[in-house]
Image (tube, grey):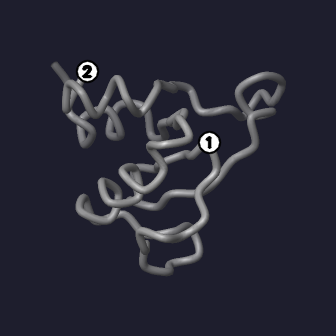
Amino acid sequence: MRDLKELLREKGEIGFILDEDERSDFLRFAKANGFKWLNGKEIKEDDDCFFHVAVSENYTIANISAMCFIKDKRRPAFRMKFKDFAENGSL
C-alpha cells in the first residue's frame, strides 16, 4: 500500500474526484496534511471546492475543470475518487 506522500513523490500530482458530500471532508483532510491553496492561502473548511481537485507534491491544491480528465493532455497522470482513498488511507 502506498500513502499520499509516496504517491505524490512518484506521480508529482494526483487528481481527486469528489462527491457532493465529500468536499468539506476533503478540505479538512488537505488542511490536516499541510496542504495550502495554489495561491498560498490557508485552507478553510467552508472554502469553495470543485468536484475535481489536483494535489501537488509541493503540497498545494487547486480546483480543476472536469475537462482536464477528459481532453487535456496535461491532466493529472493519476486520479482517483477521494472516497476510495479516504476509506483505505492509502492505495
* Residue at the image position 56 percent from the left and 41 percent from the top: 20
* Residue at the image position 75 percent from the left and 43 percent from the top: 65
SS under mark 1: loop
Give the Cα separation between the discs numbered 2 and 1. Answer: 20 Å
First of labels 2, 1 by sequence position: 1
Mark 2 neighbour class, 10 Å CA radius: few under 14, some 14 to 19, many 20 or more? some
Which residue type carries mark 2? Leu
Q: Position of residue 53 (x, y in %)?
A: 57, 46
Q: Which residue is mark 1?
A: 51
- In this view, 78 is above or below 50: above
As drawn, is 72 to the left or to the right of 74? right
Which of the two marks, 2 or 1, is nearer to us in this view? 1
Q: Nearer the viewer, residue 1 or 19?
A: 19
- In this view, 90 is above or below 37: above
* Residue at the image position 45 percent from the left and 40 percent from the top: 12
SS under mark 2: loop
Res 3 → quadrant: top left
As drawn, is 52 to the left or to the right of 78? right
Tell me the number on the disc at residue 91: 2
| Res 15 visible | no
Q: Nearer the viewer, residue 41 or 83?
A: 83
Q: Position of residue 8 (x, y in %)?
A: 35, 39
Tally the numbered discs. Answer: 2
As drawn, is 69 to the left or to the right of 21? right
* Residue at the image position 72 percent from the left and 34 percent from the top: 74
Q: Quadrant of the N terminus?
A: top left
Q: Position of residue 13 (x, y in %)?
A: 49, 40
Q: Nearer the viewer, residue 40 or 47?
A: 47
Seen as rendered, the residue at the extreme left is 1
Q: Quadrant of the C terminus?
A: top left
Which residue type carries mark 1? Phe
